Structure formats: C-alpha cells, structure tokens
Amino acid sequence: MPDHRAAYLGASGRIGGLLRVAERLFPEDAPGCLWQYRAADSCTENSFLWSDFRDPAPLVAARSQHGFDCILIFSGASGDKDDPDSMRVHVTTVDHAITAGLRAGVSRFLVASSSAVYGPGRGKPFREEDLLAPINAYGHAKAEMETLCTRRAAMEGIEICALRIGNVAGADMLLGNARSRAGASLSLDIFPDGHSPERSYIGPVTLLRVLRALSTLQSLPPVLNLAGARPVAMSDLLDAAGVPWTARPRTDAGHQKISLATSRLARLCPEIELKASAQEIVAEWNAVRAGT
C-alpha cells in the first residue's frame, strides 16, 4: 500500500490551506495526502516541492518515494476572473499536471472545476447534464479545462473526474472576506421577498471526507457536482459566524438562487452526511480556523 493515497497539487491555495488543517485535526477522514508546494520555504511534513509543472521530474520522484495512486489537481490561478489571459492558466496547469502524472505512472485524477461553468441561475439546481453557459473568463477557462480532461481521458485511457465545486466555507468570498474585516459590517444583497442569496456550500472537513471517498472509488464519472445537498442562505451563514451585515436591495432574481444538484455525489458517497445546515457548515470552518 502507498503511504500517501493522493498527491494534492495546490497546497498553498485557499482550499488547500483549509484541507491541510482539516487533515491534521481529523486524520481518520483524510485521503493521506502528499502536499505540493511551489516554494521551498513553504514545504512542511508530508509535502514536496514542484515549482514548474512543465517539468515532470519532481512528481515522478515524489511518486517513486511515496507511492500515491491518485492526483488531486487544485492548483490554479489568482487574479482578475474577467481576464482571459490570466485565467488561461487553469487550462495549461491541468494539461501539464496530467502529462506529468502519466510520466509518474498515475492513471487517476480528480480536477477542481467550478460551478461557474453553469452560468447564472435558472430557477432550479444545476445537474451535471445541463448545458454550460459561463459568464466570465474564469467560467470559460474551467469549461475549456473540462473539455481538455474529457479529451485526454479518452486519448490516454485514464480516469479524470472534473469536480464542479460550489462554495467551500472559508475559501469563499463571503466567509473568507468576513474573516479579514475584523468585525466590520458586510453589505449583503436582499431581494424583494426579504431573503438573501442561496448557494451550495460545503464545509472543509466534509470536503476532505468526500475527496478521500472519491480517491478510492472503483470508478469515477467524468464530471461531478461537489457541494452540500442543502443550499444555504448567505444571511444564515453570516449570522452563524457572528458577522454583522446590512441589507443591500437587489431585484435580479437570477442572482438569488444558484445551487447544485448533488444526487450523483450522494450515491457515490452514501456514508458521508451532505445535508449540513448553515450552522454546521460554519462550525466546520470555525474548527479549522481554531486549528491554524
């Protein structure tokens, strides 16, 4: 058996940072990750340095030493999500990582995509079969990346599952930004019915458990929505986190309810509770925050 089941690319990212702490706090739920960093001064225990994905040698050496059999590609690009040039990195990074993984003898990849590939809300939860209609460069890049994954999986005879991830508590713009505002009130959209936006969220500990389960499944679908089964109101999340907020009137109904259908995920991971409330999701985030 390998001493690390999966290599996680993108350990210094927002999601990676949360997952690293969650793994330390709940090792029984972890996929046994070997964490990849681009800078040597960031490397810690159970990690390896790989600064240029175009060079497969560090990944080949890491697998030779640790024996992982799945690669989680969560490394991407920061910057302006409306800038096609900077968002293009989401495509090239995955392409280079798959090529390197093949050189290392790995044939299973879980790749972070995004719910942004679906576009604006359409009045019901998005299913994996729905047509994609991204509205910004980030969403278009993720959709192009998924096309790349489909093509390479067929061409190479390997498994690649694109994870259309909703909001990860603490790595999202709402709670993630609230933490840095030191108690300052946030403006929150409130619609004519008196309610805030609803989104599909997942806590970082539950995400860790899902990744562990997916990394060991006998077979994977080419795409998979990844979020909690119960959409949550942003106002409930802020209230649960003790973050003050003020109402900002908004009338764009297409922005109010955007969620993911997760029946496929529930079938693949029946042992994982996905119906967390806003309070339970925030509790996971707080547990991880306390562990940093």
Image (spheres, rainbow, N blue to C red):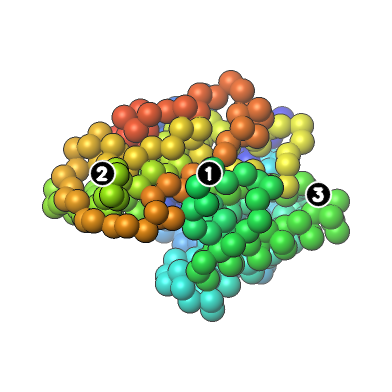
The image position of residue 270, as x and y in percent, is 61, 23
Q: Is residue 57 left or right of residue 290?
A: right
- Please name the residue shown 37% across and 58% down the image: 252
Q: Amino acid at mark 1?
A: Lys
Residue neighbourhood size for the residue with mark 2, other residues' Cα within 10 Å, grouped as few (<14), some (14–19), many (≥20): few
Q: Is residue 236 left or right of residue 243?
A: right
Q: Name the mark on residue 158.
A: 3
Q: Name the mark on residue 124.
A: 1
The kind of secondary structure element at disc 1 is loop
Of the image marks 1 and 3, the number of the one nearer the N terminus? 1
- Please name the residue shown 23% across and 56% down the image: 249
Q: Which residue is mark 2?
A: 194
Q: Nearer the viewer, residue 244 or 129?
A: 129
Q: Is residue 119 left or right of residue 107?
A: left
Q: Name the mark on residue 81.
A: none
Q: Amino acid at mark 3?
A: Ile
C-alpha span from label 1 to label 2: 19 Å
107, above or below 132, in the image? above
Position of the C terminus by quadrant: top left
